[in-house]
């Protein structure tokens, strides 16, 4: 069957109700453009040819489609004269490409992100089995306003589709609607398209008028009702974008739960379409997993964590963290309150702890940065421990430089590493050090002079303050006890 299938995706309309500089079908849902979702479903059906009709902002839409489906045929509809005209432009492009239209032509829209391949497949198969000239994927909805209604005769046979603006009061009460997805016998379609007229309420060439033409020619037409009407719902405005986005998320999260992922609070858990989760992953409330994030078995993510394009190892624990393009090793722990910026890698059993920011930093197996630190442009060797409150001063105001900390080095609290600088394997630094020169392996770096205590400083420099009073009282007490 697939060799005989052509799929046309309509994406030329303006989508003005989105009120956006971004073309409607490019708005993301679950981390993918709406048209990207439709094309993914269409590709799974493995048609011989995919034709995308572009018009409005085609400089944005065309390249996007070509990137996703390099062998899709782009048909340009300069002015949008209606769905019938759009499909005619698509079929002309097929002919111009030297291909003869035979078999089945499926028409879908680029703004229905929830559409599933199985639904398209089943619809095309039923259409072919019934040997129809036209099949309608219809749905029964509570609020049919705005849709084309499927008009049936007393015998229940489909007579045609009437658009909202052209419908009589009686027809407007029909709740069976045209989802917009239609299947055609290719030869019939090519013959019917030039015969459509725009003599109607909208002055457009309605693709839906093909149903009347088929009936008039004595050909079979029919409708196939889809139970899951959300699959064919299009997005027209931002409110629908949010609603269908939430519906898609619910489906994605449900699917992962069925695959063995524990999701404590599905309502506050957001997972993009391309994320991959292993069995026995646990997602705590308030988690967003975005882009191409991959989480391995037994990892626990959250609460309140956003990870984009991250890779989380087996059994890792990531708590209240914001991360992008980071790789976290097996059994490692991150957070609470960590900020992982691009280029962060943490080895097995390592730790990036509380209030720690990392960027372009490679931390080895068992390396630990437990508290209050900035680690930028750095390499931290296996088993090294960075003291609390350490700043890797990577930027001299002009250029960025690297810091290398050796294996099993142990650096003191409140250090500043002024890059470029190297701290050798097994080396140490004293608390409060400002490390400007390399530290050889095994050495202890101590910076700043020895401590001096200026006796009586508070009494002479802060006389009359509570500080001086407290100092005086303590000194008096010592004197009395002597
Ligand atoms: C259309 C159907 C209607 C159906 C509804 C489902 C027709 C005449 N009407 O109505 O029966 O219930 O969809 O949502 O087909 N497009 C183009 N070029 C054009 C016109 C439209 O590419 O010249 C694209 C649009 O970008 C959109 C789709 O086709 O993705 C549907 O067009 P739209 O104008 O929204 O049709 P509706 O009036 O909603
Ligand atoms: Ca529409």
Image (cartoon, rainbow, N blue to C red):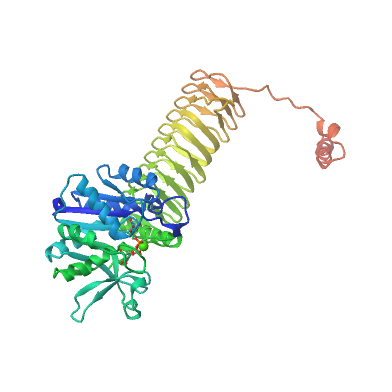
Nearer to me, 471 or 395:
395
Residue 430 % position (x, y): 59, 26
Can see residue 226? Answer: no
Q: Is residue 426 left or right of residue 189?
A: right
> Viewed as shown, does residue 183 lie left or right of 175?
left
Q: Is residue 476 left or right of residue 236?
A: right
Q: Residue at (49%, 44%) from the top-left corner?
A: 335
107 versus 170 height, above or below? above
The foreground one among 48 and 308 is 48
Q: Is residue 472 left or right of residue 410?
A: right
**Residue 119 placement (x, y as % from top left):** 23, 61
Nearer-the-camera pick, 33 or 464: 33
Q: Quadrant of the N terminus?
A: bottom left
Q: To which quarter of the image does residue 267 belong?
A: bottom left
Residue at 18% from the left image edge and 67% from the top image edge: 214
Residue 479 seen in this snapshot: yes
Q: Which residue extends farthest right?
A: 464
Residue displayed at 21% across by 73% down: 158
Residue 175 at x, y = what percent?
31, 75
Q: Quadrant of the C terminus?
A: top right
Q: Position of residue 347 (x, y in %)?
A: 40, 35
Could you say which is closer to the camera, residue 49 or residue 298? 49
In the depicted structure, whether residue 42 falls above or below residue 234:
above
Q: Total number of numbered labels?
A: 0
Q: State ligand 2's quadrant.
A: bottom left
Q: Is residue 405 above or below residue 266?
A: above
């Amino acid at each position: 069957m697939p060799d005989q299938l052509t799929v046309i995706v309509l994406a030329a309309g303006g989508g003005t109700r989105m009120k956006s500089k971004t073309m409607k079908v490019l708005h993301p849902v679950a981390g993918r453009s709406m048209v990207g979702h439709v094309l993914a479903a269409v590709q799974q059906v493995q048609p011989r040819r995919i034709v995308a009709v572009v018009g409005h902002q085609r400089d944005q839409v065309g390249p996007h489609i070509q990137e996703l489906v390099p062998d899709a045929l782009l048909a340009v509809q300069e002015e949008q004269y209606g769905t019938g005209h759009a499909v005619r432009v698509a079929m002309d492009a097929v002919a111009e490409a030297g291909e003869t239209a035979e078999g089945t032509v499926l028409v879908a829209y680029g703004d229905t992100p929830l559409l599933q391949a199985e639904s398209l497949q089943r619809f095309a198969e039923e259409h072919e089995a019934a040997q129809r000239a036209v099949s309608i994927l219809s749905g029964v909805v509570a609020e049919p306003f705005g849709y084309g209604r499927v008009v049936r005769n007393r015998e229940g046979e489909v007579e045609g589709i009437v658009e909202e603006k052209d419908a009589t009061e009686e027809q407007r009460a029909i709740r069976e609607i045209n989802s917009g997805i239609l299947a055609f016998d290719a030869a019939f379609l090519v013959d019917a398209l030039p015969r459509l007229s725009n003599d109607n309420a909208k002055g457009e060439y309605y693709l839906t008028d093909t149903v009347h033409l088929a009936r008039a020619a004595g050909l079979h037409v029919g409708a196939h009702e889809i139970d899951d009407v959300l699959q064919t719902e299009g997005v027209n405005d931002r409110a629908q974008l949010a609603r269908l986005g939430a519906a898609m998320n619910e489906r994605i999260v449900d699917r992962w739960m069925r695959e063995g992922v524990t999701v404590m609070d599905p309502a506050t858990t957001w997972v993009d379409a391309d994320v991959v989760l292993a069995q026995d992953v646990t997602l705590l409330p308030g988690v967003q997993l975005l882009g191409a994030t991959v989480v391995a078995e037994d990892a626990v993510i959250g609460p309140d964590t956003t990870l984009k394009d991250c890779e989380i190892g087996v059994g890792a624990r990531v708590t209240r963290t914001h991360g992008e393009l980071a790789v976290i090793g097996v059994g490692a722990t991150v957070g609470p309150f960590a900020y992982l910026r691009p280029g962060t890698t943490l080895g097995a059993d390592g730790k990036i702890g509380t209030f720690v920011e990392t960027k372009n930093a490679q931390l080895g197996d068992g390396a630990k940065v437990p508290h209050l630190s900035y680690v930028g442009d750095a390499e931290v060797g296996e088993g090294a421990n960075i003291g609390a409150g350490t700043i890797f001063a990577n930027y001299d105001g002009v250029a960025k430089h690297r810091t290398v900390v050796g294996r099993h080095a142990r650096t003191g609290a409140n250090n500043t590493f002024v890059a470029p600088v190297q701290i050798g394997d097994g080396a140490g630094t004293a608390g409060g050090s400002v490390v400007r020169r390399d530290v050889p392996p095994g050495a202890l770096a101590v910076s700043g002079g020895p401590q001096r205590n200026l006796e009586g400083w508070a009494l002479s420099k802060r006389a009359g303050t509570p500080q001086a009073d407290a100092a005086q009282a303590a000194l008096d007490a010592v004197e009395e006890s002597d």
